[in-house]
Amino acid sequence: MSILSERVRRSLTREFSQSLMAKIGLALVVLMVTMALFAPFIAPHNPTQQGLEESNLPPAGVTQTSSDIQFVDGERQTVETTTTGTLDHPMGTDSLGRDLFSRVLFGARTSLMVGLFGTLFAVGTGVSVGLVAGYYGGRIDDGLMRFADIMLAFPALVLAIALVGLLGPLTIRIPDPFVALGLVEGMPDSFVFPVTLTIVVGVVNWVWFARIARGEALSIRQQEYVKAARSLGASDRRILRQHVLPNSLTPIIVLATIQVAAIILLESSLSFLGFSGTTLSWGFDIAQGRDYLGTSWWISSIPGLAIVLAVIGINLLGDWLRDALDPGIEGEHGGGM
Amino acid sequence: MSTYQFLIRRGLQGLLVIWGVITVVFLLRFMTPGSPVDFVAPLDASPELRAQIARNLGLDQPIYVQYAQYLGSLLQGDMGFSYIRGRPASGIIFLRLPATIELAVAATVVAIIFSIPLGVISATRRHEPADYAATGFSLVGISTPNFWLGIMLILLVSVGLGILPTSRRPIGLVPAMEMLIFQFETVGIQTWIRHMILPAITLGTYFTAMIVRLTRSGMLDQLGQPYVKAARAKGLPETLVTYKHALRNTMIPIITVLGLQLGTLIGGAVITEFVFNWPGLGTLIIDAINVRDWPIIQGALIVIGVGFVVINIVVDALYARLNPRVSLE
């Protein structure tokens, strides 16, 4: 069974061909996914390789003058050095001499992985809880939704900060398949996946999916075809999976797209605070650059631009899906800072 | 249901939620690896000293006793003593609270001042350059992480142009106002404003962007309604139609979403405070998390939870007053 009906597919393509914004969104997302997937091939340097003689180099074509105080023959002199960035480090280097372009490429992996898996976790938990609550109703519904209310009664970002900061950054190392197969050399052989962070961003976001799934389940369980299925002896499990879930997919897909953007923003905030457990993240690099704003503006600026472009891309895709599918949910962007 | 009954019912629900928050915050300490003793005791502490510290902190009791003691002392307004500073946690927290409230209110004011006119212009000049500029701004605004925006503002305005301070602010609103009233001295309030501008823009931009979108789509909806046509037909000037009739009806969904987004505002404030070294609850929590100062962490989280619940009840009550079609239920 195809998830998307013929009508839905036509509506998607029509909306896409008419909307410039949808095309921009898709282009940005494709760019980000390509960066993340093929980072070891594209990156000119190992993103973790340090070199102090190459620290704080400006991006290609940018000239930076810095003054230094030196003592020559016991006399104090101000020495001006002018550095111009070269294509060897297209986006310059950070304070430890690591190549910023390579770091941006590898940082895309962290954002994308946490965004995708965090959303999947939220969808999985939220949709199961919501479907069960809406379908069975009664006590189960009351209990689950009361719990959801408590979750909503606390600012998600504060909860996430407290949980990630206190539980500690548990991470796992995922081997990089390209390096393992020997296709590239000189790149990190594994990718640090922040497990605590991913679970926490999922935990603070599942409630939205639970609410939508519950609403859909409530309305669908009254429909004739569900009653018919039940009178034919279909089990609750089968009804939920075969009838209720497919019919509530549209709003869930739209919300999930938007949530990927929200979770990427959340991930970058937590990495910025140093709570994520990985050092290859856009948010982490922005924090690193804070101490060098006066001399090396690019260290904080460039990873931030990457976040903004990625989130804009996903938000535009979300707009496109929403306009094409019109699931009747409120047209909010995945924000949440 | 009368407003009175509504408030009582929501108050009781709110108490339940607050109890939930307190319980979760209490349990958090037991889910966290490591014992608070590790952070309080000297590195070379003898087992006897460690046991003594645990006893002093009440950690040697069974968990349900600790829970009961915690609830009991909270009821008396006692959040325990800060492990690090050795002063009552409640005092430290309430000293920091005004800075956070000032920041949140300033950001909301910034957002409302800029967003509603932008949204209206965007809707009334659809597909004109002004509309594209406003929608473009709002797309970028909701896609920008606020900590990065704050850093970029520091980079451009403070480092680049050399105006507006970025350091920890020297004076709060209350002392600044006291100075103004009792000494006719405006230095305090000027300093306060100069320190407030960048953080308020940083925190307010996301909301500005969001309200622009809401205002635009709401206004477009309303401007297509028959009552707008009727108002135009009877010869009302367009300004009056736009601002008096259409905008008023657009305000209802805007207030709903603003209420829902209060959590985002508070969360955003925590990060914004961190960027600007703002002496509020946000920096307090982050610092406390880093040194596992549990009384502060728990107390601050509970204060945020309580504040959030109270604001939500107020927003709901206001909402029903603004929109008579909504019943209090």
Image (spheres, grey):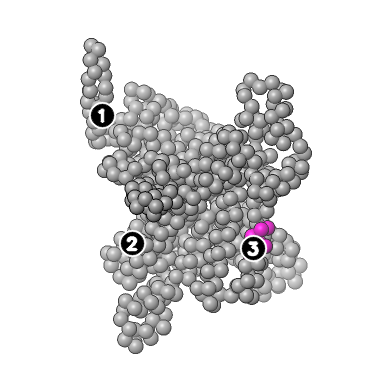
Q: Is residue A199 above or below residue A210?
A: above
Q: Are marks 3 and 1 on the same chain?
A: no
Indicate left or right for A306 with B301 as reference: left
Q: Which residue lies under the disc numbered 2?
A: B134
Mark number displayed over residue A155:
none
- The percent position of residue A78, horizontal first and vertical second, equals 22, 23
Q: Which residue lies under the disc numbered 3?
A: B11
Mark 1 packing: few (<14 Cα in 10 Å), some, or many (20+)? Answer: few
Chain ID at mark 3: B
Q: Please provide the residue range marked out in magenta.
A: B10-16
- The percent position of residue A80, horizontal first and vertical second, equals 22, 25
Looking at the figure, which quarter contains the C terminus of chain B? bottom right
At label 1, the amino acid type is Ser
- Which comes sooner in the sequence, label 3 or label 2? 3
Magenta stretch: helix, strand or loop mostly: helix
Q: Would residue A304 be seen by someone viewing this image from the given angle?
A: no
Label 3 to label 2, Cα distance in Å? 40 Å
Q: Are marks 3 and 2 on the same chain?
A: yes
Q: Residue at x 66, y 58 (%)?
A: B15
Q: Residue at x 64, y 48 (%)?
A: B77
**Given this view, does label 3 or label 1 mark the residue nearer the observer?**
3
Label 1 to label 2, Cα distance in Å? 39 Å
Q: Are marks 3 and 2 in contact (CB under 8 Å)?
A: no
Q: Which residue lies under the disc numbered 1?
A: A66
At label 3, the amino acid type is Gly
SS for callout 2: helix
